[in-house]
Image (tube, grey):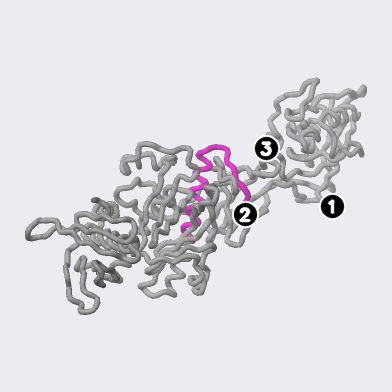
């Protein structure tokens, strides 16, 4: 059962509806995967708005006199019908201890109240069996007589391949046979080889004996504020199917959490992401209280940046991005104080960067209709980083980032548009030095007036055009650009050529102002940047 939070905001026009998932509380059983041993262990996850808690099962004393440590010594009296009343799995040949895999209801082991599925056998009648094979333990138990004393310790991390049931006692089906296998239940609920099979008294506890229960206990809490999620194997850059890892700001890791079905994995990924997003919004609100209206945080969050190696290899490294006031920031770690904003690895002016959705891979149910909106036909299933976007800056600098969910990609796209629109409206205009045929000029992009070119010394206006008069452009990829304007009187196309020191920044600025102008005319038209691109890069 999950408790839903407040309803998500309305989806923007031109995109599918299921972009954001409300914050929620969830509880479920999953697997904690150990990459070194390649074993997975049952854990229970508890998700709240602020914390992801990892729980493991353990046996605890709830009454009576505890024997100390985590060891329990129990005496079983073999019954004429049912024998010891348990089954075992495991053995040293598989590098795992022998564990109790089934306990049969109302039989000897069950009657003690001190044995549980998942208990590892340490001793049988005083003989150490911690490094014994499966067959050796089966032989000891079958030939131990009518009274068997075993010492056990609950195995909190039982490998999943043992397929131990989560509950105890287990189902009372009979899988015993004359042969035994460490990966299958060896039934010890028969009489064994004892010659004396007279009925014996039940193995029931007495009042002073300790009482035990198997419970889920908290073992790790991962704070979600400023946490990040990774679905990829470090170094190998391979996608972990039905699995992800949550890493807290202080370095605490949940470990690799694997889920039994793809749907469970997707549900938990979206739920944890939604809670992180909600906490990030709270942090943004707190940060904005200390900022002027012109320097507000519009959006921030974790991404992975694509890095190109000298040998053409590709790796991704986590980065924290922020859209704040006039700037786009790239951090290695999140800014947690006002002073942290000056330590960004990169800072770019929003008007001079270009955001572009790099690639979509539509695997989530809520995105199945997105190809109708985006015109996508072919999907690259080999690409291990499906949700990518590019941020292109001045002087040819470019960054490629990846996020974990399509909904996050949509939020970044919308946030860039909003932050750029706000900055264009705040600044109103930007002026760049340029030249043509040896003459120094100034070129201004103005939100209200459009484009103006004037002499740098005399301020004499040479020409002026509205945004609507720009019909196309072309450039040499270095310093020169041709802007094609339509004369309102003659309807003829006039070509204006200019040369800039940082042509890329100027082109991005023109793009940003056109996109903001289109959005101001039609606020509901989401994809205004596509229209700006049409004007800017057609020849």
What residue appears at the point 68 percent right and 40 percent down from the top-left corner? Answer: 39
Disc number for residue 253: 2
Q: Residue 274 in magenta? A: yes
Q: Is residue 247 visible?
A: yes
Q: Which residue is mark 1?
A: 68
What residue appears at the point 35 percent right and 56 percent down from the top-left corner? Answer: 414
Helix, strand or loop status at disc 3: helix
Helix, strand or loop status at disc 1: loop
Image vertical order of residue 189 relative to residue 535, above or below: above
Helix, strand or loop status at disc 2: strand
What residue appears at the point 51 percent right and 70 percent down from the top-left corner? Answer: 343
Give how far apart the Cα atoms at labels 1 and 2 are.
31 Å
Percent coordinates x, y for residue 397 in the rendering: 42, 59
Of marks 3 and 1, which one's residue comes earlier in the chain? 1
Disc number for residue 260: none
Front in this rendered view, residue 439 or 475: 439
Give how far apart the Cα atoms at labels 3 and 1 are.
28 Å
| Corner quadrant of residue 239 | top right
Front in this rendered view, residue 195 or 323: 323
What residue appears at the point 29 percent right and 60 percent down from the top-left corner? Answer: 480
Image vertical order of residue 504 relative to residue 160, above or below: below
Q: Main secondary structure of the magenta part?
A: helix
Q: Count of labels shown? A: 3
Percent coordinates x, y for residue 322 in the rendering: 44, 63
Q: Which residues are magenta?
A: 254-279
Percent coordinates x, y for residue 219 in the rendering: 68, 53
């Amino acid at each position: 059962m999950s408790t839903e939070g407040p309803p998500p905001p309305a989806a923007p026009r031109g995109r599918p509806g299921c972009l954001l998932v409300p914050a929620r509380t969830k509880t479920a059983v999953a697997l904690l995967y150990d990459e070194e041993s390649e074993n997975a262990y049952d854990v229970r996850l508890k998700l709240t708005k602020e914390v992801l808690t990892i729980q493991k099962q353990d046996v605890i004393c709830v009454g009576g006199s505890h024997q100390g440590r985590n060891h329990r010594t129990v005496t079983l009296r073999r019954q004429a019908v049912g024998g010891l009343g348990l089954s075992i799995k495991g053995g040293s040949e598989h590098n795992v201890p022998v564990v109790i895999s089934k306990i049969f209801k109302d039989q000897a082991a069950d009657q003690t109240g001190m044995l549980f599925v998942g208990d590892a056998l340490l001793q049988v009648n005083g003989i150490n069996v911690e490094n014994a094979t499966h067959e050796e333990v089966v032989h000891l138990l079958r030939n131990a007589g009518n009274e068997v004393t075993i010492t056990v310790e609950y195995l909190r991390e039982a490998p999943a391949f043992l397929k131990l049931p989560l509950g105890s006692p287990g189902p009372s089906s009979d899988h015993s046979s004359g042969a035994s296998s460490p990966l299958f239940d060896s039934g010890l609920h028969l009489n064994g080889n004892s010659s004396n099979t007279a009925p014996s008294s039940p193995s029931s506890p007495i009042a002073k004996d300790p009482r035990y229960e198997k419970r889920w206990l908290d073992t790790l809490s991962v704070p979600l504020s400023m946490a990040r999620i990774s679905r990829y194997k470090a170094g190998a850059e391979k996608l972990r199917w039905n699995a992800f890892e949550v890493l807290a700001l202080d370095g605490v890791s949940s470990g690799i959490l694997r889920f039994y079905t793809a749907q469970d994995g997707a549900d938990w990924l979206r739920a944890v992401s939604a809670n992180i997003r909600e906490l990030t919004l709270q942090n943004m609100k707190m940060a904005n209280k200390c900022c002027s209206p012109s320097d507000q945080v519009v959006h921030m969050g974790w991404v992975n940046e694509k890095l190109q190696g000298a040998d053409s290899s590709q790796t991704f490294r986590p980065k924290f991005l922020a859209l704040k006031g006039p700037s786009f920031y790239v951090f290695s770690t999140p800014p947690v104080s006002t002073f942290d904003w000056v330590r960004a690895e990169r800072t770019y002016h929003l008007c001079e960067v270009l955001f572009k959705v790099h690639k979509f891979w539509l695997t989530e149910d809520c995105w199945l209709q997105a190809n109708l909106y985006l015109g996508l036909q072919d999907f690259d299933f080999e690409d291990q980083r499906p949700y990518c976007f590019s941020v292109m800056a001045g002087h040819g600098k470019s960054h490629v980032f990846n996020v974990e969910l399509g909904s996050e990609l949509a939020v970044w796209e919308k946030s860039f548009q909003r932050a750029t629109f706000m900055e264009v409206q705040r600044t109103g205009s930007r002026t760049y030095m340029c030249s043509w045929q040896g003459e120094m000029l100034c070129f201004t992009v103005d939100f209200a007036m459009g484009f103006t070119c004037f002499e740098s010394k005399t301020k004499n206006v040479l020409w002026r055009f509205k945004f609507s008069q720009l019909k196309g452009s072309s450039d040499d990829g270095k310093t020169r650009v041709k802007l094609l304007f339509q004369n309102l009187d003659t309807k003829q196309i006039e070509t204006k050529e200019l040369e800039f020191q940082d042509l890329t920044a100027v082109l991005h600025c023109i793009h940003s102002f056109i996109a903001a102008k289109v959005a101001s005319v039609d606020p509901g038209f989401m994809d205004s940047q596509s229209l700006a691109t049409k004007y800017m890069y057609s020849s």
